[in-house]
Image (tube, rainbow, N blue to C red):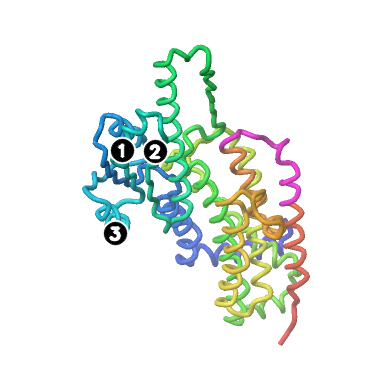
Amino acid sequence: MPSRLLAVVRKESREVLRDPIYLVLAIVVPLAVTTLLALGFVLDVKHLPLALYDEDRSPLSRDYMYAFTNSEYFRLVTMASSPAEIDRLIESAEVRAAVLIPPDFSRRLDAGEAVSVQVLVDGTFPIRALVASGYVAAIDAQFTAALRARYLARQGRVRTNLVPVSVEGRVWYNPSLETKHSLVPGLMVISLMFYPALLAALVLAREKERGTVFNLYCSPVSRWEVIVGKAVPYIALAFVVYVLLFALNLYVFGVRFVGSPFVLTAAALLYITASVGLGLLVSVFCSTQVAAMLVTFIALMTPSILFSGLLTPVSSMAPTAQFISRLIPASYFIAMVRGVFLKGLGFRHFASDLVTLAVFAAVVYGIAILGFRKRAG
């Protein structure tokens, strides 16, 4: 490493190490925020509070209600005594769904007639309401199929008319369908985009505010030595954060990991380098720390959350959103993280993504070096 570059690295490293706020921001805050988000950001739709109102009070209606209460998707809160109580329970959000069984439920079924069961779902959380409606439809279909099988059995037509079709569903990579296996690694990607970039964005902006940037202007160090020299300590810090976040995924949240740590680490190093480079790029063009923080949050944090595929697959987004996602390094890294964590994929599957991240980092550092102009006075 050239002596002038090494001198910039040493100077910036001392700045980081002797400033406890920077160390807290760099290490503790990403871990704390990731932990809080992982604990609070629950997308699993299970144990929905449910109320039942049975006007029929027959063995058949009890079987129908048992189909709901025996499911892990619903949690029986109460047996309502009237439709008005159902309305009150949903209005007060004590229950999120309710099933109302009419008084002629068993009589109509025994007569071979269709019967309508009213299901009310609280739509204030649309995604959960949609999933809950799907659960209700599935449970109802299962109950109806059982009734049809019993009816045909009584008619002695099982072997001739009933041709059962069984669906054997298998979920790959995340058999338990737990959100944490997908969400917590995704939060690691967002943390590694925002915090390293934020710290790097403050570097030159802080020196501009203090006036110490003129020392750099007057020094013999070249522009690339300044940018690279200031990036190295933050890449090292971000790598420490990555190791801790990786351990947090495995040992605190118990996220499923079947891939190679070597593949993930190689991708993380490229991603961190690009993230720090973006922060320095912001710092080059911002004169104050406040402006650098705002630009980093708006330009990096927000798109990374919305367009990287953290919450919605990129392939399901509108064409414009997909185009934006291609411009965000988090989109490439989040695909690699989930591929390594859940599918155990290796370098061969991510060659193009790794090359894209490397090119992205090279372009960002190139623009930052060109944008940092040494001037006196």
Q: Neighbour class for label 1 at 10 Å: few (<14), some, many (≥20)?
A: some
- In the rendering, at what x and y percent does residue 246 appear? 51, 44
Residue pictured at 31% horizontal, 59% vertical: 91
Query: Where is residue 154 drawn, in percent x and y?
Result: 39, 16
Residue stretch in magenta: 342-357
- Residue 210 lies left or right of residue 154; in this view the side is right
Q: Do the residues labelled 1 and 3 touch (CB within 8 Å)?
A: no
- Labels 1 and 2 touching (C-beta < 8 A): yes
Which tag is nearer the camera, tag 2 or tag 3?
2
Distance between mark 1 and mark 2 Cα atoms: 8 Å
Q: Which mark is residue 104?
A: 1
- Rendering coords of residue 307 (x, y %): 62, 57
* Residue nearer the viewer, 43 or 336: 43
Question: What is the C-alpha distance between the residues marked 2 and 3?
Answer: 29 Å
- Label ID, residue 115: 2
Q: Please tell me which residue lies in front, 144 or 168.
A: 144
- Above/below status of 73 relative to 203: above
Instruction: Count residues near mark 3 (Cα–Cα under 10 Å), then give few for <14, some for 14-19, many for 20+.
Output: few
Tag 2's secondary structure? Answer: loop
Residue 269 in view, yes or no: no
Q: Which of marks 2 and 3 is nearer the N terminus?
A: 3
What is the tally of numbered marks visible in this picture?
3
| Real-space CA distance between mark 1 and mark 3, rounded to the nearest whole angstrom | 29 Å
Q: Which residue is label 3 attached to?
A: 92
Q: Residue at x 36, y 35 (%)?
A: 71
Left or right side of 203 for 131: left
Residue 98 place in picture, x, y as percent: 33, 47
Vertical order, 256 against 210 (above or below):
above
Q: Say if 159 sits above or below 51 in the image.
A: above
* Dot 1 amino acid type: Asp
Q: Which amino acid does label 3 sit on?
A: Ser
For residue 351: magenta? Answer: yes
